[in-house]
Amino acid sequence: MFAFLPGAARVPLALALLVSNIVLHIVPLFALTLVKLLLPLRGWRRLCSRVLVWIAESWIGVNNALFALFTRIRWCIDGLEGLRRDANYLVLCNHQSWVDIPVLQKVLNRRVPFLRFFLKSQLIWVPLLGPAWWALDFPFMKRYSKETLARHPELRGRDMEATRRACAKFRELPVSVMNFVEGTRFTRAKHDAQGSPYRHLLKPRAGGVAFVLDAMGAGLHNLLEVAIVYPGGACSMFDLIAGRVHEIRVSLRQRPLDASLRGDYEGDTAFRERFQTWVNALWREQDDRVERLQAISG
């Protein structure tokens, strides 16, 4: 409806409505979180967690409706069949832009359990959104560089312990845990600097995936692979709101997670090599799917 407005009018109106939607949902979210903290009864906390997820899914649903009003995107999506809200998923996706997140939310909201991302610890300080992510049990991670661990060996293992504490919260309710396997957004310069063997992807970082699988134990049953392609090229959130994104292609594939994929990634060399082989094979298949999505004629 608003997609035909000139950009000078559409962008500020869209931003105002998106911010209003944040405030509309964040007030009850914070209020219920406070009640949950003040009454730490297990049954009550589980009920509060379910209501918090309902608020978050409503928030995403309104965002999706606003994007539909302000944009004219042609969506090409396959693989939605068989998704379940009562199953637990590890979601792996290629990463090109921050637009990937609203795309994932558009495609998966209310089709699978509420999607949670592992976030850098610094993001908790983002106004309004940081506390909201914390209230929704998004795991905040502080990863240490090899240089830092060399200087402070007592920090070794703390990131894994933080992963375990975060994942422990997910064992009582269905959950979808999201991981951008490349660890950073794709650019051709990064691709060339890595010497990546893939045509459209950076090298996968197997350790993060292994940590999540180990920390969740038998709590994750299914792998959901998502490939996203922007035929017009990688875009920004401003491009999305300004109506410059005309088509988005998404392909999903799910498969069961084998128990053999859980093990001591850091301490068991044989397991680490097997796991890296599995991730690399999975990523070659993902590269082929991205290639096919790009080859679709408009």
Image (tube, helix red, strand yellow):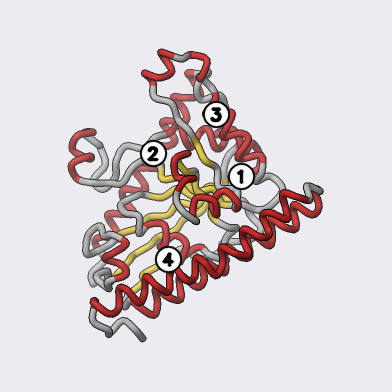
Q: Hey, what amino acid is under mark 2?
A: Ala
Q: Nearer the viewer, residue 194 or 144?
A: 144
Residue with the mark numbered 2: 281
Q: Is residue 286 above or below residue 252?
A: above
Q: Secondary structure at mark 3?
A: helix
Residue 257, how many percent across, how many down?
57, 43
Q: Earlier in the sequence, mark 3 or mark 2?
A: 3
Q: Nearer the viewer, residue 109 or 156?
A: 156
Residue 160, numbered circle? 3
Q: Earlier in the sequence, mark 2 or mark 1?
A: 1
Labels 4 & 2 near each other (Cβ < 8 A):
no
Q: Hey, what amino acid is under mark 3?
A: Met
Q: Earlier in the sequence, mark 4 or mark 2?
A: 4
- Measured in 3D between alpha carbons, the distance from the residue under mark 4 to the one under mark 2, in whole angstroms, is 22 Å
Q: Residues within 10 Å of mark 4 (few under 14, many from 20)?
A: few
Residue 84, how many percent across, how many down?
61, 61
Q: Nearer the viewer, residue 182 or 38?
A: 38
Residue with the mark numbered 4: 78
Residue 146, numbered circle? none
Residue 220, numbered circle? 1
- Please tell me which residue is depicted at 49% across the width and 70% down the height of the picture: 21
